[in-house]
Each structure stands twice: as C-alpha cells, then as structure tokens.
C-alpha cells in the first residue's frame, strides 16, 4: 500500500490512520475530525478537502522520492505517538502542573494547566 485514504469528516481520533502510519504508509485525511492532528501535511501524508484527494494521489504517485520520504516520516511520527510515549508526556504534564505532590508536605501549587497542555500538544511529537 502506497497511501492510505481516510475521507472521514467525523472520526474523533483515527486509530486506523495511526496504524497506517506505523506501517510506514502516509495518510491522506480531511481537515475535519481528529486525524488532521496526526498527519503533518506534506511530511507524513496530506490534509486536504475530499475533492482534492485525487490530485494528491496523482502528485504522490508521480514523485517516488517524496513517497519514500513520507513513508519514513510517517513511521517515525507514529513511533512518537505510541501509548508509552503519550503516557510519558501526560505524566510529564502532571509533574509540571503539580510539582510538589511527590513531596511530604502535599502542598502543591499548580501552574496554568491550559499553558502546560498547550506545550504538551505542540511538542515535536505532533509535528
């Protein structure tokens, strides 16, 4: 398989997209729904309107070097999104938000959860 097409506009996460990428298959997804957060447009696949899918397929099928690069990048991106990697980032976020909870006094002074979550989801794992 050279490219995985996933035209869903309603899927909330897109496990099948992540599975394709883990297999070294770039994904073509819509800008609607959750899979758009898994695909780095032009690097690990494409994020495009359904009406542009055919053009993207033609573009990639005529550019073997781009396909090879996307296959490698898709696999590497999926590895950074493994459950172990995701849980490590969640634990890191908790440690940042509640730095004193492991101490003996239990008086944690949380920092901005919104800012920390933003930092968590904008790490290179999602790019």
Image (cartoon, helix red, strand yellow):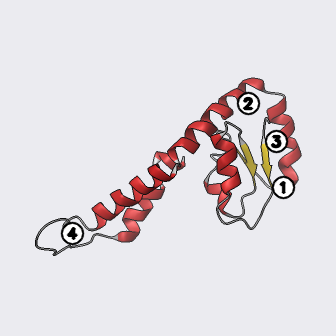
**Residue that label 3 marks:** 56
Q: Residue at x 71, y 38 (%)?
A: 25
Which mark is in front, 4 or 3? 4
Is 113 situated left or right of 54 in this image? left
Q: Are marks 1 and 4 in contact (CB under 8 Å)?
A: no
Q: Which mark is residue 101?
A: 4
Q: Residue at x 70, y 53 (%)?
A: 16
**Residue that label 2 marks:** 67
Q: Position of residue 48 (x, y in %)?
A: 76, 52
Q: Are marks 4 and 2 in contact (CB under 8 Å)?
A: no
Q: Position of residue 46 (x, y in %)?
A: 72, 45
Q: Are marks 1 and 3 in contact (CB under 8 Å)?
A: no
| Distance from the alpha carbon under mark 4 to that under mark 2 | 47 Å
Is 29 situated left or right of 111 in this image? right
Label 3 Cα crowd, 10 Å radius (few <14 / some 14-19 / many 20+): some
Answer above or below: position of 20 versus 97. Answer: above
Label 1 Cα crowd, 10 Å radius (few <14 / some 14-19 / many 20+): some
Q: Residue furthest bottom?
A: 107
Label 2 Cα crowd, 10 Å radius (few <14 / some 14-19 / many 20+): many
Q: Residue furthest left?
A: 105
| Distance from the alpha carbon under mark 1 to that under mark 3 | 10 Å
**Residue that label 1 marks:** 50
């Amino acid at each position: 398989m050279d490219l995985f097409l996933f035209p869903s506009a309603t899927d909330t996460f897109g496990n099948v997209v992540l599975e394709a990428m883990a297999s070294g298959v770039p994904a073509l997804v819509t800008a609607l729904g959750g899979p758009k957060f898994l695909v780095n447009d032009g690097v690990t696949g494409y994020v495009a309107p359904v009406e542009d899918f055919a053009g993207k397929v033609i573009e990639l099928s005529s550019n073997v070097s781009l396909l090879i690069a996307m296959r490698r990048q898709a696999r590497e991106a999926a590895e950074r999104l493994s459950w172990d990697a995701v849980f490590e980032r969640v634990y890191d976020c908790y440690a940042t938000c509640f730095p004193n909870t492991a101490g003996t006094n239990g008086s944690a002074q949380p920092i901005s959860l919104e800012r920390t979550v933003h930092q968590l989801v904008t790490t290179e794992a999602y790019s």
